[in-house]
Image (cartoon, helix red, strand yellow):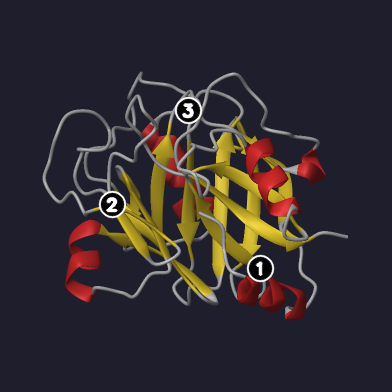
């Protein structure tokens, strides 16, 4: 689904802003980190085009945006998906609900409760724990559910173990309390959940953070020379939409 002409014009009217991406080492693990100012940058979710064909790759989204005088800046995969690339959990794109909220526990990382929802509204981005999301019922323009939560109200997920031996490439997102700061990270070295959650809470100072996925994870970060290209077809993707220069 692609946005309307009105959205394109609104993008042109926004003050100039750029996603800040950097590589950092924290507790001997290397991460690529991209910070988005949700007040001035347009974060959007992408799954399929107007014909229902799954985008799957960052380049396909960029090509579709170019038809409207836009381009894709920073981007990353944004939640778990089935073999046909349908979202496992709750998914809203441009106000249209594709998949309902899944509140119950289940197998795998997604069902390791508490899980959560990233909610995008004009001018802000927020990570909610799923039951809190259901209670508050925010009017999200876009939303994606994934799991587990990495940080919940300033506390690490209670199932994370300091001495865990489960190490994978991982990516996720954390948001500030005022919703203006959305920070995305992907590990360039294998990390445990405890290490990854600690990155968001202790290093980035974020009280709520959500895990997206593991080894399939990719990040498009032009400033870091990362195209995020790969052979694996992704499901939900989140990215910053910019006017084409």
Give how far across and how far down residue 220 sits, in percent: 68, 40
Q: Can residue 97 be seen in the rendering of this structure? A: yes
Q: Disc 3 or disc 2, which is closer to the eye?
A: 2
Q: Disc 3 or disc 1, which is closer to the eye?
A: 1
Task: Kindly identify which residue carries mark 1.
Answer: 41
Q: Residue at x 74, y 34 (%)?
A: 226
> Element under label 2?
loop
Q: Disc 2 or disc 1, which is closer to the eye?
A: 2
Structural distance between the alpha carbons of marks 3 and 1: 29 Å
Q: Is residue 163 above or below residue 111?
A: above
Choose the circle earlier in sequence order: 3 or 2: 2
Task: Give left or right: position of 66 versus 77.
Answer: right
> Element under label 1?
loop
Q: Residue at x 60, y 33 (%)?
A: 57
Task: Kindly identify which residue carries mark 3.
Answer: 191
User: Do residues under tags 3 and 1 come within 8 Å of each other at their CB atoms?
Assistant: no
Structural distance between the alpha carbons of marks 2 and 1: 23 Å
Structural distance between the alpha carbons of marks 3 and 2: 26 Å
| 183 or 217, nearer to the observer | 217
> Element under label 3?
loop
Choose the circle earlier in sequence order: 3 or 1: 1
Task: Kindly identify which residue carries mark 2.
Answer: 90
Q: Can residue 155 be seen in the rendering of this structure? A: no
Give how far across and how far down residue 69 sits, in percent: 78, 60
């Amino acid at each position: 689904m692609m946005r309307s002409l009105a959205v394109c014009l609104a993008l042109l009217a926004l003050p100039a802003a750029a996603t800040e991406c950097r590589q950092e080492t924290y507790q001997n693990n290397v991460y690529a980190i991209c910070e988005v100012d949700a007040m001035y940058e347009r974060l959007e979710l992408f799954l399929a085009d107007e014909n229902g064909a799954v985008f799957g790759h960052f380049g396909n989204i960029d090509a579709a945006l170019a038809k409207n005088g836009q381009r894709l800046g920073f981007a990353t995969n944004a939640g778990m998906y089935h073999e046909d690339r349908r979202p496992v959990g709750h998914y809203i794109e441009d106000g249209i609900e594709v998949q309902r909220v899944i509140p119950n526990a289940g197998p795998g990382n997604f069902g390791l409760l508490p899980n959560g929802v990233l909610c995008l509204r004009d001018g802000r981005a927020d990570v909610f724990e799923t039951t809190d999301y259901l209670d508050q019922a925010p009017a999200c323009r876009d939303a994606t559910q994934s799991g587990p939560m990495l940080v919940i109200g300033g506390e690490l997920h209670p199932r994370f173990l300091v001495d865990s031996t489960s190490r994978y490439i991982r990516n996720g997102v954390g948001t500030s309390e005022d919703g203006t700061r959305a920070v995305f990270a992907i590990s360039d070295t294998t990390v445990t959940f405890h290490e990854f959650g600690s990155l968001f809470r202790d290093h980035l100072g974020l009280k709520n953070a959500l895990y997206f996925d593991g080894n399939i994870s990719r990040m498009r970060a032009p400033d870091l020379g990362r195209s995020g290209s790969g052979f694996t077809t992704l499901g939900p993707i989140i990215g910053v939409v910019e006017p084409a220069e």
